[in-house]
Every structure is written in C-alpha cells, then in structure tokens.
Image (tube, rainbow, N blue to C red):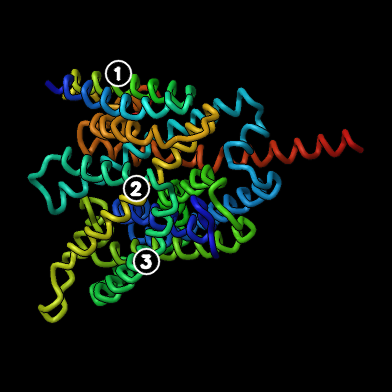
Amino acid sequence: MKIFVLVLIVIMVVIAELIPLMKKKQHKEAAVLIMLGAVTLAYGYYYITHENTASLVNLMFDIFGSR
Amino acid sequence: MKTGKDKISVKQLFFVFTIMVSSPTTRLLPKFAAAKAEQAGWISPIISTVPFIMLILVIDSLLKKYKGQSMSDIISSIMGRFLGKLVLVVYFLWALWLTAMYTRYYTERLTSSIYINIDINVFIILALIPIAYILHSGFTPIARMSEILLPFIGLMLIMLSLFLFPKVRANNLLPVYINDIVPIFNGSISITGLLSYLFLMFFLSDKVVNLKSLRTFGYISAYVNISSIMMVNFIVIGVLGSSLARRVYMPVLTVVKQISIMDVIENIEAVVVAIWIFADFTLIATLLVIVLNLIKSIFNLSDTKPLINILAVLVYYLSLGISAGRFELEDFTNNLLMPINITLGYGFPFVLFVLSTLKKKEKTSKSG
C-alpha cells in the first residue's frame, strides 16, 4: 500500500511538472525532473522495504568508519 | 535598500542566516558546550569569532575578485569545469543532507516537547507543503519574512534572559581557569560548525545585490550571532548547571519552563515553540533554495521551479529514513556532522581562496 502511494505521488508530481516543460521545450529541465523522480522512487522504495532498519546516519558512520 | 524581483540585499541574507543559526543554537549548543567545557561552556562562542570573521573576509575577497558571479561560478572558474562540478555535487549532497536532517530535527523537537502522541509524518508534511508553495514565489518572501521574524526572536531572547537572570547561579558558571582553554576550544567546535552555513548561503550570491557592504553586515552578524549564542549558553548553564544541561534533551525548553513571574506569567514555552517553528521553517526553506540553486549550477538549467515539488517529496522520504531515532541523529550531529561542516564550510573556502590567489599571481607573472 505504501509503495502504491509513493509511486502514485511521484508519478503525479512528475507528470504535472513535465507537461508544461515539454510544451516550453525545456528538455534539460525535464530530464533532471525525471532523474529526481527516479531517485525519489528508488530511495522511497528502499525506505519502505527497510522501514525498521533503514538509517542514513548508520550508513554515514559506516562510510566514515567512526562510531 | 530597494531590491529587484527575486533579488535580496546583503542585510536580508544575514537576517536569514541569523534565523537559520538560531534554531540549532537553542537545541544543540548549550548541551554540547556544557558537555565539553562544563562551567566554562558559556565562554566557548568567543573562540568561534576568529574562524567566522576569517570566513567572512575570505568570502568577501572571493566575491570582489569575481564580481557579479555566484559562488558556483567562482568555484568552476577557479577549479575548472570538471573539478568544479564535482565540488558542487559534494555541496549539493551536503545541503540536501542538512535539509533532510533539519526537517527531521524539527519534527523530533515538536513530538518530544508538546505534541508527544502525534506521528512525525504529520509535521513533516505540514512543513514541506507550505515551504514548497512559498518557494514557487522565489527566495524573496523568505528573506522578507526573516526581516519581520528576527526582531521577535531577538526580543524573545532578551525577555527570557531578563526573566531567567535571577535564577542564574554564579557557582554554575565559575570558576574559569586558564586550564579551561582546551575544553573551551572543544566546546566551540559545534558553534564554529554551525556558523559554517554562511558559506552555503553564498551559493545564493547571484540573488544578492549590493555585495559591497558584505564586510560591514558580516561583522554585525558575527557580533549578533556570537553574543546571542553566548547569552543562551550563559543562561542555560547558569540556571541548570553544566551536569544537568548536558543531560537534558532540550535544555532551553527546560529552562524556559522554569519561568514564573508572580504566578502570573507562566507556561511561556508555547511562545518559544512557536518561534522555533518559524525559525525551522526559514532554515528548511533556505536550505531547499540552496539545493535548487546548486542543481541549477550543476546541470546549467534556466529554471528550477518545476523541481521544487519532487524535491519536497524526496526530502520527505530522506527525513524519515535519515535515522531510526533522535539519539542516533544527535550522535551523528555531535560526532560526524561537525567535522564535515568545518571541512566544507571553512576548509574548502580557504583552499579556494589560496587557489584564486595563486592563479592571480600566475596571471600577473605571465602578463609581466
């Protein structure tokens, strides 16, 4: 259910902004918008499927090797 | 100073910066200063004056050398196209991280102070929707709102200090010996780290007019910020004592709850929380504008308004997934974020300054 809401919101937001951009022929902006949409979907999916264990802070501690 | 559409003055930029700093100041700094420097923690902001003023001078020098350019353009001019973009990506990630982190802190503060049984999702959504809406009108409304808000924050700080001054105990603040210089220096790290956000603000320098007065307003800002942080630390450590101040989750709120004047003026923490909400709103909105400006520079875009909504959705998920709880987040802020802040907020600008000076010398020797 949560994944459905995520996909629905991202698609709605991206399409709502994409249509005027395509009309104005701002292709670069459209590409960045789609890229941000994809990143949001990917991270949103990761967060929803790992809700109890997902923690960016832990990831940072692992990267910098300090705890 | 009159400003054009979507342009702000240097004064407004520093107003926004002061409000940005005020929010984490009340949450983090007294606790950190008390933990590191104990009773001498209230003196630690003085140490931060030196790097902060040096940062102002470096930014001023860079902006004077590269007139009319934004900080992103300056970085690209000095470091070259590829390295410049790489550095901008690092700053983009830092700014995005800070946006998600402060959104989470804002909700954590509300859910652990007065709205204990409310889901954090509610507050995140309630913050991000109006922010995304306002940002469609540009950065100017945020800057103008800060002009109105800052006097209220200043007034609140003065009034709270006056009300709490009788409760300050001298033995909580003294003695301070020469041996305390190392703990005082350690206590100043978090303050120095927070003040490093000034460099991030200058990624908006293409929106700022009248940069000639940067130094003057920079000095005023240094005075105002350092003295207000010192005042907050003085009151909190003076009333609670260092051992209690470092253990309480929100020492400022705990201190404010103690205010009672003739049993008439009581429970004024609601006012403090209301001002915190506005300050956090300004902080998150400004960081989002910086993120958008960095995206604009990285991809050479003409307009970033269509990206605001999707960025707000991304920040929503990032703020939920940034940590499992507030203890983890505080641990990260105290141990890892401050060195990152200092490296990116002070270290890199100084490297940039040195490189620009070397480049200038090379040019002069070639032309000579």
| Between B18 and A56, the one nearer to me in the picture | B18
Using the image, determine if residue B130 lies above or below residue B81: below
Observer-nearest of B27 and B133: B133
Look at mark 1 in the image and give the residue it sits on: A42
Where residue B134 is drawn, which disc sits there?
A: 2
Q: What is the secondary structure assignment of the residue under circle 1?
A: helix
Above or below: residue A32 compared with residue B238: above
Tell me the SS state at disc 2.
Answer: helix
The answer for which chain carries disc 1 is A
Query: Which residue is pictured at 16% across the width and 41% down the height?
Result: B122
Residue depth check, mark 3 versus mark 1: number of the one nearer the observer: 1
| Secondary structure category for the residue under label 3 | helix
Which quadrant of the structure image shows residue B131? Answer: top left
Residue type, label 2: Ile
Chain containing mark 2: B
Q: Chain of mark 3?
A: B
Closer to us: mark 1 or mark 2? Answer: 2
Task: Reply above or below: B135 against B91.
Answer: below
Kind of residue sitting beneath label 1: Ala
**Badge 3 or badge 2: first in the primary sequence:** 2
Query: Which residue is the site of mark 3?
Result: B231
Q: Residues within 10 Å of mark 2 (few under 14, many from 20)?
A: some
Query: Do the numbered discs 3 and 2 sit on residues whose CB atoms are within 8 Å?
Result: no
Q: CA distance from mark 1 to mark 2?
A: 27 Å
- Could you tell me which quadrant the C terminus of chain B lies in? top right
Q: What's the residue at 38%, 21% (across, down)? A: A34
Residue B138 is situated, as x and y percent measured from the top left of the image, at 43, 47
